[in-house]
């Protein structure tokens, strides 16, 4: 077993003054759409009190990776920055790494600090090649941690940069909040099929739903991304929450909408989600 802090030691970096940051899906989208330039600008603006950089000299950046079979979250390594300067952001002085779209989005904010970050050559050969176990979904809220204190197991050391392979419909699991940033091949696969799916809350409550529209499972799940309930009465009453989503059954291409809804009803009966879950009908 090999840990990320050991990787940093091999690079002869100061582990004690290094923080690990697993950014959210906004960071993942910045990375995928603009690479190190856009992501670096995104990472240059951070809420204060407390700062995720917390007196660190170096920051190792990760974006969300695929959820593991045991429910743990992962982080995909995208590089290391030196933290050269910090100041109260007022829309004036710009950070060293700049992207017009990111800066425009931050222009009117006054609750953030701005940073001058510098990408290091050290570790750059491993960008998008190291996947670490970050921890349970609840622990993922602690998205900034000291490298010397929180040892992250390295799960994969990939030969090259690549999108992870689609795990298959039966093994697919994701948080709803992470659906927009799924790899493109995964999104294509999920939008190509209709079927029955399962939402599970952090407390274990279950909801069975179905996707019958043209955009398939992906299109249905994007409704939850938008409002947290997808139009369901009981979910609306719970407010905007995140759920773990998985697939119970993929419908055959020629299956009629009413047949898919009938299969949804069968799964509700099997799992008891009307009596003990979040299904109201």
Image (spheres, rainbow, N blue to C red):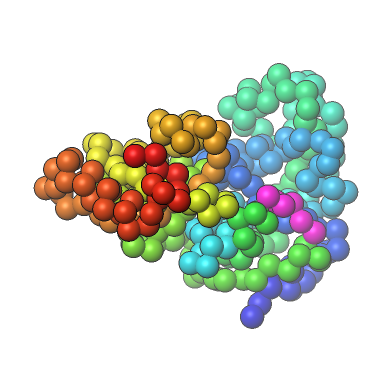
Can residue 37 be seen in this snapshot?
no
Can residue 73 be seen in this snapshot?
yes
Q: Residue furthest left?
A: 254
Would you identify the image quadrant in which residue 77 lies?
bottom right
**Residue at 28% across, 56% down:** 249
Horizontally, residue 74 falls left or right of residue 184, namely right
Horizontally, residue 101 falls left or right of residue 11, namely left
- Against 151, residue 274 (above or below) is above
Q: Position of residue 149 (x, y in %)?
A: 81, 65
In depth, the one of 172 and 53 nearer the eye is: 172
Membership of 148 in magenta stretch: no
Q: Position of residue 153 (x, y in %)?
A: 65, 71
Q: Position of residue 142 (x, y in %)?
A: 72, 52
Quadrant location, the N terminus:
bottom right
Q: Which residues are magenta?
A: 141-146
In depth, the one of 44 and 270 nearer the eye is: 270
**Residue at 73% across, 68% down:** 151
In depth, the one of 104 and 149 nearer the eye is: 149
Horizontally, residue 175 falls left or right of residue 118, namely left
**Residue at 25% across, 36% down:** 213
Membership of 144 in magenta stretch: yes
């Amino acid at each position: 077993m090999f840990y990320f802090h050991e990787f940093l030691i091999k690079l002869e970096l100061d582990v004690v003054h290094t923080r690990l940051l697993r950014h959210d899906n906004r960071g993942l989208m910045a990375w995928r759409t603009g690479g190190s330039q856009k992501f670096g600008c995104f990472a240059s603006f951070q809420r204060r009190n407390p700062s995720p950089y917390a007196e660190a000299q170096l920051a190792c950046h990760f974006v969300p990776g695929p959820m593991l079979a045991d429910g743990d979250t992962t982080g995909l390594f995208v590089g290391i920055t030196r933290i050269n300067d910090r100041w109260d952001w007022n829309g004036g002085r710009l950070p060293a790494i700049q992207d017009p779209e990111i800066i425009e989005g931050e222009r009117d904010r006054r609750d953030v600090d701005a940073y001058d970050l510098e990408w290091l050559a050290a570790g750059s050969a491993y960008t998008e090649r190291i996947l670490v176990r970050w921890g349970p979904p609840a622990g993922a809220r602690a998205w900034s941690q000291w490298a010397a204190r929180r040892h992250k197991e390295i799960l994969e050391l990939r030969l090259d940069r690549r999108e992870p392979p689609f795990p298959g419909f039966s093994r697919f699991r994701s948080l709803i909040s992470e659906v927009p940033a799924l790899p493109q091949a995964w999104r294509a696969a999920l939008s190509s099929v209709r079927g029955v799916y399962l939402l599970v809350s952090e407390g274990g409550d279950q909801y069975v739903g179905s996707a019958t529209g043209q955009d398939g499972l992906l299109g249905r799940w994007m409704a939850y991304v938008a409002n947290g309930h997808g139009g369901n009465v009981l979910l609306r009453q719970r407010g905007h929450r995140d759920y773990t989503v998985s697939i119970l059954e993929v419908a055959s291409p020629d299956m009629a909408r009413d047949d898919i809804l009938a299969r949804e009803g069968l799964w509700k009966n099997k799992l008891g989600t009307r009596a003990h879950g979040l299904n109201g009908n």
